Amino acid sequence: MGSRHKRRVTLAGTSIKIPGDMGSNLDRYKKDLAGLVERGQKLAAAFLFETSPDAIRRELGKTMDPADVERLIAEVPVFAEGYQAWYTEAKALVRQVLPDRLNDFVSHYEAPKGRKQLDGHTYRICDAVLGHAAQNGFGNIVAQPSNAIQHFDAQIGIVKAAEARFSSALFDIRQLVQADLFDSELDAARSLLDHGFARAAGAMCGVVLEHHLAEVCSAHQVAVTKKNPTIADLNEALKSAAVIDTAQWRHIQLLADIRNKCDHKKNVDPTVAEVTDLVDGVGKIIKTVH
């Protein structure tokens, strides 16, 4: 993953480390996806060998010397040891890059809900990782790790699809990188809040919310007449264009009120609870309003 660094701000004589992003998010995602595909293919070879070792040795022996065959096999990873880490990383990237395929991806790993018996149709990768097998009343094996190979192949296919979509012009790279930057700013706001700078944290969240709503207006080609629109202006424009519903509009309106309390010096300071609601609320908005 891309390297991270800490930027430092000083408020009222207190030095605070705030998370920031170094390097290119785009390059990081490309590298991660390519690495996941490569690791997945190696694990697929390992899975195939573990389920059919004799057949694989015979096939390799047709074009390789016995010593070379054994040397190659010695380099094959253990499927169960490498799969869990691969699955965790792949699931996270599919969620972000190809969210409409996430449930499909997970279904190839998890046992079907309400499964009453283990057989070739209900066998999943989680069963293979644990080495589960099942027999019928005659002692014949009806489910074993080889039944999960098709599911792992499907998962690798989904990761490849994510890689292809990421590289395609149809995928909005700008939005992906912008989301990372917003997350970094919210981390900074949380750090300020933790150190007792509620007003500054709230002001920072307000900037994030304002920029995000402006991005949403641009993405949906919603016209905003003011040269320097406020959160309230952007919120109204999105509601009028039916991009957000009434509940979202009210939520954003509430967040804008807290932000205004943070931005303008008044007799009443914003409370920690209010700014916490603002940080959490902005985090929700940037993930649900697009």
Image (cartoon, rainbow, N blue to C red):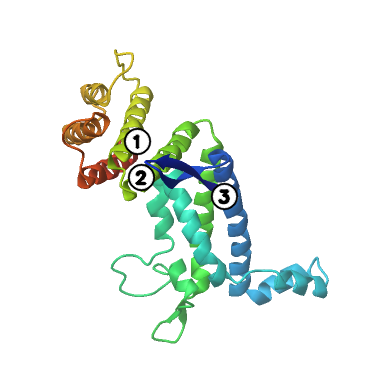
* Contact (Cβ within 8 Å) of mark 1 with mark 2: yes
Circle 1 sits on which residue?
204
Q: Is residue 138 visible?
A: yes
Using the image as rendered, state which of residue 64 and residue 175 is in the foreground. 175
Circle 3 sits on which residue?
32
The local secondary structure at tag 2 comes to: helix
Could you give the CA–CA distance between mark 1 and mark 3, rounded to whole angstroms?
30 Å
From the viewer's perspective, is 180 left or right of 71? left
Which quadrant would residue 46 be assigned to in this image?
bottom right
User: Which amino acid is tagged 1?
Assistant: Met
Circle 2 sits on which residue?
192
x 30%, y 65%: residue? 113
The local secondary structure at tag 3 comes to: helix
Q: Mark 3: few, some, or many residues within 10 Å (few <14, many ≥20)?
A: some
Where 59 falls versus 229 (above or below)? Answer: below
x 60%, y 47%: residue? 31
Q: Nearer the viewer, mark 1 or mark 3?
A: 1
Using the image as rendered, state which of residue 153 and residue 58 is in the foreground. 153
